[in-house]
Amino acid sequence: MKRIATRSSWIILFVFLCILVVGFYLRIGSAVGTLVINPLRADAGNYFMYAYNLRYKHTYSQEIANMRDLSSPVTPDSVRSPGYPLFLVPFLDGLSFESFVDRVIIAQVILSLLTILMTYLLCKSFLPHVWALAASLLVAVSPHLIVANSYILTETLFCFTLTVTVWLTGFLRSNPSWWLTLGLGLLMGLASLVRPSLQFFPLLFAFFLVFQFGWRRGGKLTAMALIVFSLSLSPWIIRNMHTLGVSGDKTLMINFLHHGMYPDFTYESVKESRGFPYRYDPRASEISRDIPSVLEEISIRFQKDPMKHLHWFLIGKPVAFWSWNTVQGVGDAFVYPVSRSPYFHAPFFKWSHHLMHALHWPLVILALFGTLMVWLPLSRIGIEDGAVLTARVTSLLLIYYTALHVIGAPFPRYSIPLRPFLYGLAFFPTYLLTFALTGHFRDRVKQSPSL
């Protein structure tokens, strides 16, 4: 038995290494073979300027002043959170933009490779090795996760940080220590500084801990996690209060609500406005004046055409959020235009792209079932408590982000960092089916008088 177990472990290791090699080949090939047209445009340009001004002018600002004159002042702001700009700072080398972009891409390729490993470790905590390997393979060949490495955007860093965080939650069942809870609170805080959209998730996670462990034990874990989470955000908030007199800028929140209120991402069904409806709306500046103005406009539009907007918010937005094609980008997996990519001509790249494109909606539908099924009383049929806990946190994260983007803008680009969790839960219904067919479910039912 020991020899069989050892042989099985070596086979698992060999298969995973093969998956890692495939992932490395695709990521390096994409990094070398992809040329982004004007890589420091739009959001990427903002992140670069924050990092540049922070390093060379010691001011957190996205303002483009005289970059060659390091003594020229820039105006501080807090439109974007500092997580990703801080990640970019070590890669800066004066005004050598090309070398800066190249170094960031290589670093993101490494993080993306580590995400494959973290996906396997995460998924094997609630799936058998075979299904965990399958989920990591999907992450390895996912065009969205691969192409994201070539952009100066938050997707790669956020995906890695989020995967590590959720993986660590699986240890709470066997080792609910203060240090582990402290680490989780810190990681959630750091991830929130990369993407502020995560900042409300710790509250939902706190309720989950109480639900999972009870008031006495769960309350202590919750208190520690929330305190450390708050402390990790406090330097950013204190800086804003001291420098700007406010805790944070509301611009992105206003845009998030405003840009998501147009059905099918279009203004008055004008095809040319798709993806950027607010640019065609003559009242856009009035609507986006502040949060109450946006909410009032959404209410007015619901009253004028309730069925159209109800369909958009309840059905259209979730479907759009989990769609394959980027809406505001150039389509497919690309966010900004590229002049070349191995996905245009290289056979293996094209084949893996076609495979993932064909599997996309079946995986999304399976993940929907998996997201719901993890909340069944699985421990009664033999699924370990630790596995149930990790699967439920994964489910909670997908539910949270889907609900969040039902409220605001459901651009598919924002679902890219969630692909590892989507793939893991997509295999969960299959796992339960095989679990039942092999007789484990039936045996557990006979042994459990309470079921």
Image: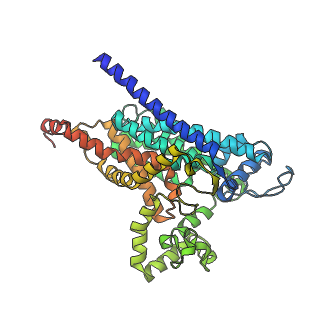
- Answer yes or no: is residue 193 visible: no
Please give the name of the residue rendered at 41% of the width and 76% of the height, measured from the top-left corner: 308
- Answer yes or no: is residue 65 visible: yes
Give residue 36's position: percent from left, percent from top: 66, 52
Q: Is residue 341 above or below residue 385?
A: below
Q: Is residue 444 above or below residue 75?
A: above
Q: For residue 90, what is the image quadrant?
A: top right
Residue furthest out toward the top? 3
The one nearer the camera, 196 or 342, is 342
Q: Quadrant of the C terminus?
A: top left
Q: Is residue 123 above or below residue 144?
A: above
The colour scheme used to paint the residues is rainbow
Residue furthest out toward the bottom? 304
Please give the name of the residue rendered at 32% of the width and 41% of the height, measured from the top-left corner: 388
The one nearer the camera, 293 or 147, is 147
Q: Quadrant of the N terminus?
A: top left
Side (left or right) of 189 relative to 390: right
Give residue 158's position: percent from left, percent from top: 55, 46
Give residue 326's position: percent from left, percent from top: 53, 59
Give residue 130's position: percent from left, percent from top: 35, 35
